[in-house]
Image (cartoon, grey):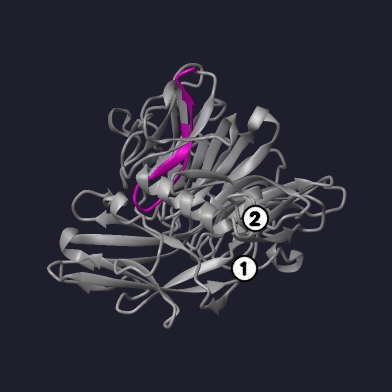
Amino acid sequence: MKRITTLLVVCCLWLLVAASTCFAQMYTVVDLGTLGGTYGSASGINNSGQVVGQASTTTSNSTYHAFRTAPNSPINPATDDLGTLGGTFSAASGINASGQVVGYALISDNSTYHAFRTAPKSPINPATDDLGTLGGMYSFAQAINASGQALGRSEYASGSGALHAFRTAPNSPITPAKDDLGTLAGTWNEADGINDSGQVVGAFGNRSSTYHAFRTAPKSPINPAKDDLGTLGGTFSAAFDINASGQVVGYALISDNSTYHAFRTAPNSPINPAKDDLGTLGGTFSVAYGINASGQVVGWALTSGDVALHAFLYNNGVMYDLNNLIPAGFGLYLSGASDINDAGQIAANVTGDGRVHAVRLNPIYKAFVQRPINADGSSVFKARRGVVPVKFTLTENDIPTCTLPPATISVTRTAGGTLGAVDENSYGMAADSGSNFRIDPTACQYVYNLAASSLGVGTYRVDISINGIFVGHAVFALK
């Protein structure tokens, strides 16, 4: 808690010069538009800034199709409409680094939904992209990883109405004998998130009683004895996303069994009610939908008095109302955020003036690691050396700047030894003219002399934040 408190004090002292609140604009907003109507909704974003979702194709909003934007671009109706599986409706749920999209669409009978997975730069091809089902009538794909493994839920027996989670082989359709993640006949299982290791998260159980979030092993079905993540004290939980470290986000009932809160677990750990409750924006409910490699979380939460749903960003122990981090007077309000990529870009939705539009939030500040640490994470240093110089330059609105505002550093061990934050209290000082973490105005850099000998062998990630918001990272190994 010491590191978080220090950060907030620094933030407020700095901002008092320019404003009377401890919030500053940290994102620009790009309205992605629609496919021709007045409705658009974003559901996912990849590290290239491609956003997917669904949007109306006509001014009457009678038809909705899945879309995939070009990198860092708004919706282009001429190129981004993904079409359907033969029917009149489709929706995109997830996208991977290659631009493959998954979701669900009506097939030609216009009454049955099937999961789909596209090729990287192609619309839906009904002949090749229909993933089929687990044996029932319908299926829905929710996410896809870098290998092309798709996951979601499907009716597992025709007419049963019950759903099982599935995870396909890379770039393959659903194979009922291999891909059904359910383990108990008659239970409900839903899969919503997957990482590049093939770990799947979702919820399983009996919907009329206990329903819990789960996280599987990389190539395994749901194991109720090992994969149950528990709750925040109540009887219900559900998971929606997982990052490469095995951190899981979702929502769960707290001990009163009537209030839902967003949660984020530690890497490959169950829900810890004492540590993993992300809280709310002042109201009674919150739901976490997306997480990136740095552990930043996005979703929606009720504001004070349960007046309205607002999009939130959870970063460095604080839940921020994203409406306070975008330009004042934007006009529309951010009602929810669905995903966040490793660059900190956020796929979200705005509401107002009778419209619902998908938007992309772009961080104003971006920090870039400098040598001797390679940007691709390939740097390896001897653990016995004295220090590892961690240096960052900064851009503001994509333009290099020498005006470097106060920043903080956090260090996480991602492989080798005990995973997780490394002595956070030691690394939470704002950059100043000191010898440990300082601003070098002549070189226009943040400089952090990280004591390697105190860390030991392992792989480490160093995140840099401004106003408490993540703006860049460095990855290196000690051997």
Furthest residue in direction right, as rendered: 60
Residue 60 visible in the shown view: yes
Label disc, if present, on residue 315 of the rendered structure: none
Give the residues in magenta: 238-256
Question: Which sits in the foreground, 382 or 467?
Answer: 467
User: In which quadrant of the rendered image does the C terminus lie?
Assistant: bottom left
Q: Secondary structure at mark 1?
A: loop
Is 202 left, or right, of 15 in this rendering? left
**What is the three-letter code of the residue carrying label 2?**
Ala
Q: Residue at x 84, y 53 (%)?
A: 58
User: In which quadrant of the rendered image does the N terminus lie?
Assistant: top left
Q: Residue at x 34, y 42 (%)?
A: 266
**What is the three-letter code of the residue carrying label 1?**
Asn
- Counting other residues with Cα less than 10 Å from the Cα at mark 2, is it few (<14), some (14-19), or many (20 or more)? few
Label disc, if present, on residue 19 of the rendered structure: 2
**Which residue is disc 1 drawn over?**
72
Answer whether labels 1 and 2 touch (C-beta < 8 Å): no
Question: Which sits in the foreground, 474 or 94?
Answer: 474
Foreground tag (1 vs 2)? 2
Q: Residue at x 58, y 45 (%)?
A: 312
Is 248 left, or right, of 32 in this rendering? left
Is 464 left, or right, of 405 in this rendering? left
Q: Secondary structure at mark 2?
A: loop
Q: CA distance from mark 1 to mark 2?
A: 31 Å
Residue 456 visible in the shown view: no
- Counting other residues with Cα less than 10 Å from the Cα at mark 1, is it few (<14), some (14-19), or many (20 or more)? some
The question of residue 19 being in magenta is answered with no
Helix, strand or loop: magenta stretch: strand
